[in-house]
Structures are given as C-alpha cells and as structure tokens.
Image (cartoon, helix red, strand yellow):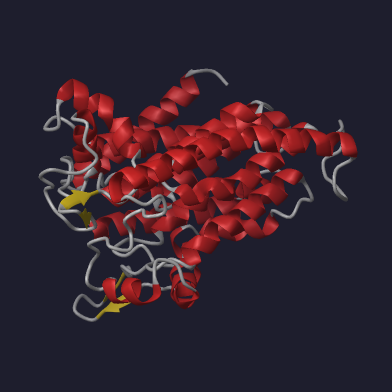
Amino acid sequence: MKIIRPLFIFVVAWLLYWATAVWGGNTASPQVAYFDYLADAFRQGQLYLAQPPSTHDLTQFAGRWYVPFPPLPALLLLPWVTLRGLAATNTVLFSTLLGALNVLLVHLLLDALFRRGWSKLSTVDNLWLTLLFGLGCVHWYMATLGSVWFVAQISTVTFVALSVWLAVRYASAWPASSALAIALLARPNVVFTWPLLLGIYWMHNLPPGLGGFASWPQPAIARKLAGWTLRSAIPLAIAVALLLGYNVARFDHWLDFGYLTENVAQKLKPDLDHYGQFNLHYASKNLWAMWLALPLWDANTRSLTPDPEGMSLFITTPALIYLLGARRPTPLALGAWVSFVLLAIPLVLYYNTGWWQFGYRFSLDFMVPVMVLLAIGAGRRVSWLMQGLIIVGVAVNAWGITWWY
C-alpha cells in the first residue's frame, strides 16, 4: 500500500474527530481526564495525585488519591507532560490523534487480510468497513472526549489493532504479542484477543491451497502452534507482572486494583458494595444494554433520545448483522469468534453498563475481532445493503454526538 492513502486516512479521520470536538466546545482537557495529572505525578516520582481536580472515580488509600485505572495512557502522555508541562497537555487532542491512528490501523489490518488472501474485499470495500469503524460505531464520539474512561479505551484499541495487524503481517510471535501486552497496561481484559492472534498464526502455517480445517492440526503444525504459544506468552506475562507490581506499589496488595474502594457514582455504589465488580447478577442488564436496549421517548421534546445506560449495537452499528455471514471454517474466523465471545464475558459480568454513555462504549474492547469477522462476513464485496447499513450507522452516531454535546 502506498503511503499516500494511509496518510490521507489518518489526516481525514483526525480532522473529523477534532472538528467534532471543536463543534461540541470540547477542546480543553476535562477535569476528569486524570491521566495528564498521573503523567505529571510519574514525572515527579509519585504514583498518586497530590491535588486532583476532582475525586470522582478515584481511589483513596492511606490518605492519598490514586487513579485506579491501569497507567498506559499516562505513560503515553509522559513525554508531552515532560516537554510542555501539565498546563499545556491536552487530553482531547491526544485522544483525537490516537483515534485517527486507530482508524488507520484498522484500515491497514483490513488491507493486510486482503493481501494475504484471507479476505475477498477490495480497497473500496475495505474503505467502507473503515468508515464503519471510524464514524459508524461509538469510536467516533469516544475519540473526541478526552476524559479518563474514554482515553483508556481509545488507547487500548490502538495497541489491540496494532497487535492484530502485526500478526497478519508477520508470522513471528514477538511483534503482535508485545503490542497486545502494551494494550493490557490500559485494559487487562483485552488479553482475550490472544485467540485471534493464535488463529492468525495458524493461518500462516496452513498448507498452500488449504483455506479451512477439518480437525486439529497435524503434528508439525501443532508443534509450531505450541512454540508460538510459549513465545507469545512471555510479553503478556511481563505485562501482567508489571500491573501486579503497580498494585503493590499503590495499595500494598498485588490483586488490589483499587476498584472496590473507588469513589464511584452513588447510582453504582450499592451494587458494587453488595455484589462486587464481577457477578452473574449483572448479566441480564449488561446483555440488554449490549444488544437489546432501545432509545427512550422524551415526552417533553416529543422525540426519541438515547438511553444513557446503553443502547443496542444493532442500532448504533446495524451492519453488525453481517457477523452472521462469518462462518468460514478457517482458523482466522475461529480465532476471531473465540476472542469476540471471551472479550464479551467480563463485560456481561461487570457491575455497570458503561453509564453515562451513548450506545455501548465497552464494545470497543471487541471491535477489532469484530472488524475481522465483518471482513469475512461481507463475502466478496460490501453489498449495497451493507453500504446502506453503514451509512445508517454513521447517521445514528451523528445523532448520538448531537445528543451528547
């Protein structure tokens, strides 16, 4: 792929995201950005916020306020804070730049799948799917906000997309698993993207002309998969060790992420205190928010309005119906489906739906495997119907941005 098209995609995506933030009057770091303050704390050799601008969703321990969320965004912001200072650091600009990079990486991934012959979609078709990701799902509004929860998810997508793209480009375990290990430093649950990486490596080792599989791989391929598994586990284990050490340094216990004592909204606190962070009790509500929730009727304005608890992915991204077409018996499809399901499980068991939000924001955790499945499910081309559904998704997300701002 020539450099012009990727550069064009990045620039256009960034201009659209930044223009959205400007239109919404949201061009300065919000009070609840936190990661800029945490980066400044790191610069001073501290792990806590000495003077946080807010304490919402922070965790107090031994009289100090900590950001409970894993530190990757703060580490990425550290050079900016070091060179320009805290006051000149803008988490909204940072988020829009990462968001544009995510759009570019998803397009590179789709193009790499086509070049490998694992997807039948041409450049134009892949541009349609890139549009779906960039403007036809919740990534659009989330990339323009700059607050702690959204920056964490946007930066996670950056390294998950990088990981999967590297896995398609290179058969080596190290590049892809290292990128995924970095993603864990923002949202550890995305470790479940790993089966997709394994499926991609399996695809690299299929005999020529064999597009699917009927049983467990032959001994020679099985040995290769076992070796790749061991090598890929090393960066992931290092990332986990770093996170656990970070917990000890903050809260004196390797399993304490600070979530159970987090200063959450009063609406969420009773369930968190009673059932904990993950529990089957939450499953029905989360599945409803993820797949079934409809807009609400506002009697005052006599119009539909998004439900801030969440809204069905089939409404915000209706082209997801094409996931039903991703049934090819290949390691790629199997790995993507396994990752999709495993990534959804902790979200279904989580103590909140992502509130306050437009759509279902946690869907970004599994959006990269979903993009792979859509590239398979679309078949030989993005049909007129699928194009229409993508355009509807863009319109729905534009409505959501108007509501949000």
Of residue 40 and residue 179, the one placed in the foreground of this image is 40
Of residue 103 and residue 34, the one placed in the foreground of this image is 34
Residue lying at 18% horizontally and 30% vertically, measured from the top left: 44
Total numbered badges shown on the rendered structure: 0
Of residue 257 and residue 309, the one placed in the foreground of this image is 257
Q: Is residue 375 above or below residue 109?
A: below
State which quadrant residue 16 falls in: top left
Q: Quadrant of the C terminus?
A: bottom left
Toward the bottom, the furthest residue is: 299
Residue 250 position within the rendered picture, expressed as x and y whole percent measured from the top left? 29, 46
Q: Quadrant of the N terminus?
A: top right
Residue lying at 14% horizontally and 32% vertically, measured from the top left: 86
Q: Is residue 89 above or below residue 349?
A: above
Residue 260 position within the rendered picture, expressed as x and y whole percent measured from the top left? 33, 63
Q: Is residue 120 above or below residue 253?
A: above
Q: Is residue 259 left or right of residue 369?
A: left
Residue 362 position within the rendered picture, expressed as x and y whole percent measured from the top left? 42, 57
Residue 119: tell me if it is visible: no
Residue lying at 13% horizontally and 47% vertically, measured from the top left: 52
Residue 77: tell me if it is visible: yes
